[in-house]
Image: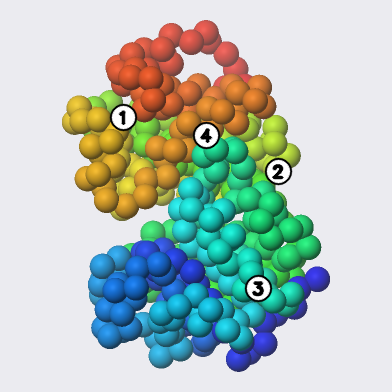
Amino acid sequence: MSQRAPKDAAIAVLGAGSWGTALAVQFARGGRAVRLWGRDAPQLARMALDGRNERYLPGTSFPETLRIASELPDALKGAHDVLVVVPSQGLRSMLERLAPWLTDAMRVAWATKGFEADTGKLPHQVARDVLGAARAGAVLSGPTFAREVGAGLPTAMTVASADAAYAQSLATELSSENFRAYTSSDIMGVEIGGAVKNALAVAAGLSDGLGFGANTRVALITRGLREMTRLGVALGAEAQTFMGLAGLGDLVLTCTDDQSRNRRFGLLLATGITPQMALERIGQAVEGYGAARAIHQVATRAGVEMPLCEMAYRVLYEGMSAGDAVRTLMSRPVRSEAG
């Protein structure tokens, strides 16, 4: 079992976007030595000079214990923990790049949400493929916006791992006066919640953009939670996980606040532009776009009915209009709410 990291051991955060930077700042606020690395060398140089990430997390200054590493080996040297913060489509390649530099003692966590597009695998399954089953791994997930974490606003999230001691260690080191981390052993459920909510947030944005109203939004969230739980249980997750931060919490946050790129993507689609145009306007990864296709594939293989996610897939990939999607959903046979 994993033990808490030595007090002076560094954590390497790989991925210097908004969320990677916010998590690096949060670990550093607790006094942990943090090395933040990303693939954009000029951007890293600017961050080192400015003492903040003005591009992705403006207004948040770096604590004294956070420094920028210009090269990956420099970030990993002497580190006890590694936190990978990249979009789901880049996780496997990042882990493959990381693997040769890992020592036996290093533990690896990730803050990646979503199914891998080609395989339908969740992040912990990708990590097992690349790093093997023996290495301690954990996922950080839950209802969090990077800007609010950077600003030090009160926040709660979940750290899930099959290794209870590792989850406890990370949660303790993340927690501070304005940040509370809870632990879970249900890594499958936590990751499914983080993946499915992205597609539902696109649907919520599209619905609101078309003026369907609050009644529609709350129905989408509630029935979406049922779909998320149904898929999770079918894949081996615990039902109660979806009533927590990484399920209901993250779903409500992402579907209702315009800080969510997935929701904003849906709002843009409602103006009549194509998904490709909307992605270009967002300018950052929109996990819900790929998630809709991956969920369609995973749910089909598992024999799980997910009408809302299926309609999102058809709108994004098959050219169905949002109006037709709503009419299809509303004309389904009446059934028990528990179904």
Q: Which mark is residue 102?
A: 3
Residue 105, above or below 140 = below
Depth check, mark 4 against mark 2: the one in front is 4
Q: Earlier in the sequence, mark 3 or mark 2?
A: 3
Identity of the residue drawn at 73% across and 39% down: 236
Identity of the residue drawn at 33% across and 48% down: 261
Q: Is residue 318 left or right of residue 73?
A: left
Q: How many marks?
A: 4
Q: Earlier in the sequence, mark 4 or mark 1?
A: 1
Cα separation, mark 2 vs mark 1, equals: 30 Å
Q: Which mark is residue 207?
A: 1
Q: Earlier in the sequence, mark 3 or mark 4?
A: 3
Q: Is residue 95 visible?
A: yes
Give the position of the C terminus as an image quadrant: top right
Q: Quadrant of residue 317?
A: top left
- For the residue labelled by badge 1, is the local secondary structure a helix, a strand or a loop? helix
Residue 6, above or below 192 = below
| Amino acid type at mark 4 | Ala
From the viewer's side, name the closer residue of 192 and 280.
280
Depth check, mark 3 against mark 2: the one in front is 3
- For the residue labelled by badge 3, is the local secondary structure a helix, a strand or a loop? loop
